[in-house]
Image: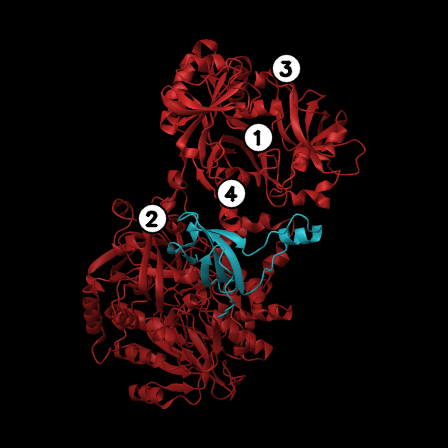
Chain colours: A cyan, B red
Amino acid sequence: MLRIPCPHCGVRDEPEFVFGGPSHIARPESSVSDEVWTDYLFMRENRVGLHYERWLHAYGCGRWFNAVRNTLTHEILETYLMGDPRPPLTDRS
Amino acid sequence: MDRTRAIPFQFNGKRFEGFAGDSVASALLANGVRVVGRSFKFHRPRGLLSAGVEEPNGLLTVGDGAARTASVRAPVQMLVPELDVHSQAGWPSVDFDVGRALDFTASLWQAGFYNKTFIWPSWHAYEPAVRRMAGLGRAPDGPDPDRYEVRNMHCDVLVIGGGAAGLREAIDAARTGARVVLAEREFQFGGETLWNGSGVDGEPGNDWISRALTGLAAMTEVRLLPGSTAVGIYDDRVTVLVERVAEASGVSGAPHRRRAPRERYWIVRAERIVLATGAIEQPLIFENNDRPGIMLAGAARQYLRRFGVAVGSRVLIATNNDSAYALAKDLKEAGVLVLGIADSRHPVPIEPSTAAASLGIEVFPGTIPTGTAGFSRLKTVWLGRLNADASGIVSSGGGTGAGARVVACDALAVSGGFTPALQLYAHAGGALAYDPSSGALLPVHPVPGVTAAGGAAQSIPAGPRMSPSGRPGRQWVDLLHDVTVADLELALRENFTSMEHLKRYTTVGMAADQGKTSTVATLDVVARLRGISPSQLKHTTMRPPFVPVTLGAIAGRDLGERFAPRRELPMNAWHAAHGALFHDYGEWRRPTAYLKPGETREGAVRREAMAVRAEAGLFDGSPLGKLEIHGPDAVEFLDRFYINDLSTLKPMRARYGLMLRESGVIFDDGTVTLLAPDHLIVTTTSGGAKNVFRWLEEWRQCEWPDLRVAIIPVTEQWATIALAGPKARTVLSRLDTDIDLSAAAFPHLGSRMGHLLGFPARIFRVSFTGELTYEINVPARAGQAVWEALLSAGAGDGVQPLGLDALLLLRLEKGFLHIGTDTDGTTIPDDVGWGKAAANKRRDFIGKRSLLLPENTRTDRHQLVGLANTDGAAFVIGSHLRVPGSAHGSDGWITSACTTVLTNQPVGLAMVRGGRARVGQEVEVYDLGARVARARIVNPPFVDPAGERMNG
């Protein structure tokens, strides 16, 4: 069970949250090619290491926020507000 | 130990007596019981090896019937009055076991034996007999009579292990003002300091412990948890402890159950964790190292000093480190004959050899056991001298050569060194590596927030652990799973070189003890067989739980009615009192049908459905998802979700809409009603209410934060009653309302706000049955009053309540879509006849672009069509369809089926490959591979195609 620091409520248990997949994925215009569109739909980095992702504090404040998590250690290095820019990579592992 | 309090107990049906303070293990030893079980594969007699959680032989069943607990470690179980303890293997008894014959076929029972042997006709033919023979213990016979609790806790520092090191860590942390939890596996704090005679800080051990406990008791921020074992550390240092509450009270069974839970499952969130978990002594590897009477030296010392039990009367000691010399001294002082100390090191360090000499005990340097004899009790040990690099025996047992030694004894105390008990450190993400100087697994790097103290942070220099001679098939590495050096040898020969593969193939370290006395030895043996150093090998992953956990403790009180929350309808009491047959749909408990006395479910469903077509019915649709959308951009916001154009929606009008995922797949459906330009009401499917709200919120918060819109879920605030049928208007008109219900003033797909029986009411003319329908929403608390008023107003007209089954039957007749029943995770709007609407909407919406992808524009996609039966039998949902002459195995499947209410015709809905172009064609219907009927593809609906009933 992760302990997740909600930027609005503080540290809470993982069962209060819902994982929302990778964050900072820009939705393309509908005029793009099939290839660009399917990349947007399906292609994800799935990287080992730092991962920018969104979480919903569903059983708390109900707010979505962003997190930087190390997929190898599960360590959440930082959480930040939805709409804030992606913080620079600082892999501590 | 309190020798004034005798405690009677039973072992294998025989009565024995122990004393207060005994463990089951010490009580058995004191009563002269040497054989406590039979081994897993070979049914060899086994005695106690250890005095702790690592015990691989003394796994016993405690209690019987529903309260039976299997694989309880004899050294860990406290003796309580009338405890009923049984061995788990051995028939007819542990002392005379016919399965022992298996031992003489040992060469057959190699690694991978099960995989290679029990394959014809299938493993399942052999499994019951194999399991019975194996002695894994039996599951309880009935529901657990005990209670369990799950509790949560936060602290700054969690100290695991309440020996001297743990007590000291707890005191140090508490002095800084930290909130401290100190968990100790045993019921008494102090660990081995309680009995090992060594002082702490120049003070006698027991005095130091009492002073430490007094000090801790005075600190308000310290919580002591005796009888609590840490079983796992998970992400972010979340730690699980299991507290044995019943055992601590010293009573068991019914008297205890009335008072307290049997166990408590603690979920601890700690900022920092200190592992003061001590170290686990390891055995030596030699031929026939599994005989009863061979025990770890530290355990023998604990039984002697703590419980007053000598492991034998003529004891030989074999060690590779200094620790066992203390046992020699204690045994000698207790008047037990010590036959000598075989020490695998050469030379033996000065200090221990001087100590032994002063006691008059002979030390055999560079010597290791090479074999033993004695069936149910050890009789003889052969010793051999190791050569310089311990790769061979200079002179071995059996009387060959100089230096060979044959010792007649009844006990052999062995010490193969100590490895820190750092399983929890490994759970927390720590890596361990083999240290050749101590033969132990030691931490490689620190884990943030997790430190070790005391024995868990030490390494003790040790010599060779393994005899280089002897038959590999008789040298046990894993006693609990009966894995020998020969098994590891064979696995390596078959190229299982990865330790993880080797573990799974041989099952070494996979037993209930999780390799606490075999993981390190496995590395030694494999390294020797491969001619490399054990430090080049990686130990297998250590996972929670550290010791077996009672399933009841994990479940806690979340059982039966408390397993999951259940949501009841606002009119639940009425339904329950009027014959409702309830079923759970997601979290909601809803009436499937209302059964009259003597009526079948099927009969009730048809009666209810008929009432709706002929008169009127009343349906409790309160779980229907309801969202209020407020704000100047509310229409703009919603228009980005639906395939239907909302920009043309007029005030007080409703529109049906489909919502897609970005992939184009249908996600949910419902209606959107415009109350005012900045206020809309969205309905969702009952099952989709939560997900649609989350979906809208995700886009609102994450993608379109610039839109001025707020979403309020109000599903539970409103009772939703659908009054449907030709007489709906007549019946509703009889209730006091300020809403004009006439067809002209309130047409189909209209909505009106007003009052009904004085309650605020929102009424929608939307229909899921194909009949004239008023969907009446009143505050949840008013639901039952309105429900009852409608029923009594319509009693003379035959108005009846209808359950979910009848509703779904009626909608099927109309060919209305039921999301999740007729659609699946691949269905796009065109598949269900909504392709044109989606294509015609000019502005973008979620999923629109995906509808243009080649996969979604194929002409041979499965499309929803109607099926009429030409053979007369009813359709079965899930049946497959084949077009005559088709090249495909299946051309589709039936998604919904029923027999029509008015015409008694079997009909269905089906997804058929290129279905819309096949209307009029015949298909074959297959149920579980057999052709059961022929059917014709038709266009739904099956009733009122012109929609006159609904629009009336």
Assess disc 2: are there few (<14), some (14-19) or many (≥20) residues with their C-alpha within 10 Å of its C-alpha. many
Q: Chain of mark 3?
A: B
Judging by the rendered image, the residue that carries numbered circle 4 is B696
Which residue corresponds to the image point at 38% horizontal and 65% vertical from the top-left? B48
Q: Which mark is residue B148?
A: 2
Q: Are marks 1 and 4 on the same chain?
A: yes
Task: Kindly indicate whether the residue at mark 2 contacts the one at mark 3 (C-beta within 8 angstroms).
Answer: no
Q: Residues within 10 Å of mark 3 (few under 14, many from 20)?
A: few
Chain that bears disc 1 = B
Up-down relation of residue B67 to residue B747 (above or below): below
Choose between B732 and B160: the one closer to the eye. Answer: B732
Distance between mark 1 and mark 3 Cα atoms = 28 Å
Give me the C-alpha separation between circle 2 and circle 4. 40 Å
State left or right for residue A76 relative to residue B240.
right
Q: Whole-percent x and y of residue B194?
A: 25, 70
**Residue at mark 4: chain:** B
Dot 4 amino acid type: Leu
State which mark lies toward you, 3 or 4: 4
Residue B600 drawn at (x, y percent):
51, 20
From the image, state whether disc 2 or disc 4 is nearer to you.
4
Q: Is residue B205 above or below residue B629?
A: below
